[in-house]
Amino acid sequence: MESRTLTPPARDREIRERRGLLFEESRRGRRGIDLPPPEFPEPSREIEDEIRRDLVDGMPELSEVEVVRHFTRLSRLNFAIDLGLYPLGSCTMKHNPKVNEWAARLAGFARVHPYTPERLAQGCLELMHDLERMLCAITGMDAVSLQPSAGAQGELTGIMIIRAYLAAQGSPRSVVLVPDSAHGTNPATVRFCGYTAEQVPSDEKGCVDIAYLDRRVDGEVAAMMVTNPNTLGVFEENIARVAALLHERGALLYMDGANMNAMIGITRPGDAGADVMHLNLHKTFSTPHGGGGPGAGPVAVKKHLEPFLPVPRIVKEGEAFRLESERPRSVGRVRTFYGNFGMFVRAYAYIRALGGKGLREAGETAILNANYLRKGLLGVLHLPYLGPSYHEVVLSDREIQKGTGVRTLDLAKRLMDFGFHPPTVYFPLIVPGALMIEPTETESREELDAFIAAMKAIVEEARTDPDRVKTAPHTTPVRRLDEVAAARQPRVRWKPDH
Ligand SMILES: *Cc1c(COP(=O)(O)O)cnc(C)c1O
């Protein structure tokens, strides 16, 4: 099994030990490119010295091939979706089609400046306008703003809109309800907007407890944030009843659409009664994420909330597109310019390439793959919730921990030796020893079978040779990192005297 390892460990170690930072590889006078002599007068010696002091001194000097090799080496020390299954639950790490990259690199898109006059950027405005319309059709909502740059920022924008809408009616109210299975960004968003986040328990099926909700929703409740399918991989069957109950009492339904991958082309949050939702283009619509790609978290609303969307809005007049900023009830701008435009091109290309039928097939295959894994891992790990799963399956290793002392993190780390990225662990919080596995629709049956076989082998090993699992990974360039220190005391700057 371990033959799936990506590069022989000895080779990686050699690569790592032989090479240092670009600064350490630097040799005075070495360069990658020679510029022609300037056509304008040479700068004075004084200015040149100053530029050298400010900009050049201390910068590494290298040839082109050294720079290329340095970054290629670094890329080989990491795991990527382009190398293998990346089943990070909740994150939808699916393949990003390369045709999207081609589209985003077309000069007319890639080189356009955000200050380009509207009349010279009609194609870009049309693309954004059409993407908004397509996202409306997919979600069953009435209007979209592409501006927010992440799911979390889409949430923030959505709750700001709810607050502005309710305030305009007399009172913003004070509480937003969040299920106990929610993604951590949901309660954080609620607090950021000045609301109190209050937890709603899940029932034994992993769904929102309707009876509890019925007792709880009063004139203080502004909204409820629901993820569907939720982070347990369970579809909220009563979502329409949840919406009706909230609406009866003057509250709104926020749909966290990060898991839209399991609904796309099959069912629409707008039809179930959602008032506002966000999408993650970097999850559902195959724009890159993880490893630094900028995100995009468009927010979609029903008609009654449209006046509150961020400005500028893209409006179509006759055949022309223009940006409109005079919207008195808008929550304002939530970021510079229009959002991450390059992501819009990729998402547009993705939707156009698949079409309605293709999107539905993607959603169906995501569900099929999650259930294939669920079946394959039945009896290997504990299943806390009865199926079916939607886009992801949540399992628990609590049976294995007993007696072996092997922890969830150990199992996840050991998967790296088999050539897989570890799944999300210890989330959702209501499942002890949770492993949250999201295969996505882009994986083949063979890849899923290999993952199931690896998981079986590791669980078996946890019983026969627990120390091997507890000390994993064994084949990666680095072993277990001090993640807390890395987050609290990051060393992001190189200093000559370090
Ligand atoms: C990923 C995710 C978010 C946050 O999205 P970001 O783009 O990471 O900010 C919110 N809710 C759920 C359910 C998610 O999976």
Image (tube, helix red, strand yellow):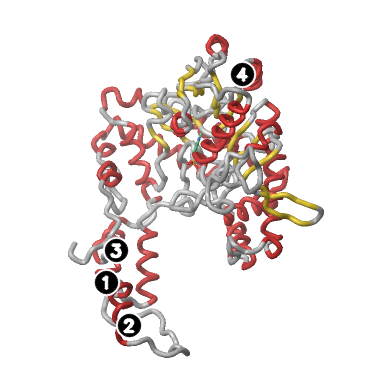
Between label 2 and label 1, give the one nearer the viewer: 2
Q: Which residue is mark 1?
A: 58
Q: Earlier in the sequence, mark 2 or mark 4?
A: 2
Whether the residues at callouts 4 and 1 have beta carbons within 8 Å, the answer is: no
Whether the residues at callouts 1 and 3 have beta carbons within 8 Å, the answer is: no
Q: Earlier in the sequence, mark 1 or mark 3?
A: 3
Between label 3 and label 4, give the one nearer the viewer: 4
Separation of marks 3 and 4 at Cα, in angstroms: 59 Å
Separation of marks 4 and 1 at Cα, in angstroms: 61 Å
Crowd rating for badge 1 (residues with CA inside 10 Å; few <14, some 14–19, many 20+): some
Q: Which residue is mark 3?
A: 15
Q: Earlier in the sequence, mark 3 or mark 4?
A: 3
Q: Is residue 9 above or below residue 201?
A: below
Residue 368 seen in this snapshot: no
Q: Earlier in the sequence, mark 4 or mark 1?
A: 1
Q: Earlier in the sequence, mark 2 or mark 1?
A: 2
Question: What amino acid is found at the position of numbered circle 4 in the picture?
Answer: Leu
Question: What amino acid is found at the position of numbered circle 1 in the picture?
Answer: Gly
Q: Which residue is mark 2?
A: 48
Q: Which residue is mark 4?
A: 246
Horizontal side of residue 388 vs 15, given as left or right: right
Separation of marks 2 and 1 at Cα, in angstroms: 15 Å
Callout 3 secondary element: helix
Separation of marks 2 and 4 at Cα, in angstroms: 68 Å
For the C terminus, the quadrant is: bottom left
Callout 1 secondary element: loop
Crowd rating for badge 2 (residues with CA inside 10 Å; few <14, some 14–19, many 20+): few
Callout 4 secondary element: helix
